[in-house]
Image (spheres, rainbow, N blue to C red):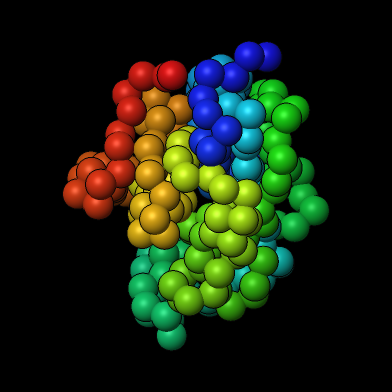
Amino acid sequence: MNPVTAENDALIIIDPQIDFCPGGALAVPGGDEIFPMVNQLALNFSHIVLTQDWHPPGHRSFASAHPGRSAFETIEVDYGSQTLWPDHCVQGTDGAAFHPALAVPHVELIIRKGYRLTIDSYSAFRENDRKTPTGLTGYLRERGFERLTLCGLATDFCVLYSALDAQMGGFKTAVAVAATRAIDIDGSLARALATMHDAGVALISTLL
């Protein structure tokens, strides 16, 4: 492996898990298509972080925890609006595992998120209350990383929130759009891309 990026560059691969791929509990259309591109992209980086959705059973974001509610409905909780999801990425289940097509052995850190029972977590940096940190910002700053490239699942939720928080945190941030896929609920992909662009996140349509 001969990485082409600098020592202060890092790649963050968002939630490359079985449950987010076809056949999984919360399948992103075409989610399994990203892995050849993610694996190729990773060859350009010496430093890589993975995130892993890691919910306890009965998590507040699950529709099953709200009798009479259905998946993909929106409810109001103490930290704002919450989309309700099918049970997914439950701790220790096969669906929470990384997809077997992911081939990135030189990952240096795995950040688990969404493990607090009452708070959902899209971003790699902060949970959905927008206050509770994951610790990733401190890790990246202590190691001297300045530029971040993101890829993974899903473009319009966890990639979006992670990219916005990375940019807000002072990192020069890019999203490798070709190595992402979206859920795309009611035009959420188009809104996500526009929001990231307006926030100054670079949207890369080709791999490095």
Q: Is residue 156 visible?
A: yes
Of 206 and 56, which appears nearest the observer? 206
Q: Name the quarter where the N terminus is drawn.
A: top right
Residue at 73% from the left image edge and 30% from the top image edge: 106
Q: Identify the residue at the far top of this view.
A: 2
Q: How many marks?
A: 0
* Location of residue 119 in the rendering, given as x and y in whole percent from the top left corner: 55, 74
* Location of residue 110 in the rendering, given as x and y in whole percent from the top left corner: 69, 48
Q: Name the quarter where the C terminus is drawn.
A: top left
Residue at 62% from the left image edge and 49% from the top image edge: 143
Of 48 and 35, which appears nearest the observer? 48
Quarter where residue 168 is shown = bottom left
Residue at 58% from the left image edge and 78% from the top image edge: 118
Of 100 and 88, which appears nearest the observer? 100
Q: Identify the residue at the far bottom of this view.
A: 78
Residue at 65% from the left image edge and 72% from the top image edge: 116
Q: Identify the residue at the far right of this view.
A: 92
Name the side, left or right, on which 71 lies relative to 44.
Answer: left
User: Is 118 placed above or below 196 here?
Assistant: below
Name the side, left or right, on which 189 lies relative to 173.
Answer: left
* Location of residue 173 in the rendering, given as x and y in whole percent from the top left corner: 38, 43
User: Is 103 placed above or below 84 here?
Assistant: above
Q: Is residue 25 visible?
A: no
* Location of residue 100 in the rendering, given as x and y in whole percent from the top left corner: 72, 28
User: Is 85 placed above or below 171 here?
Assistant: below
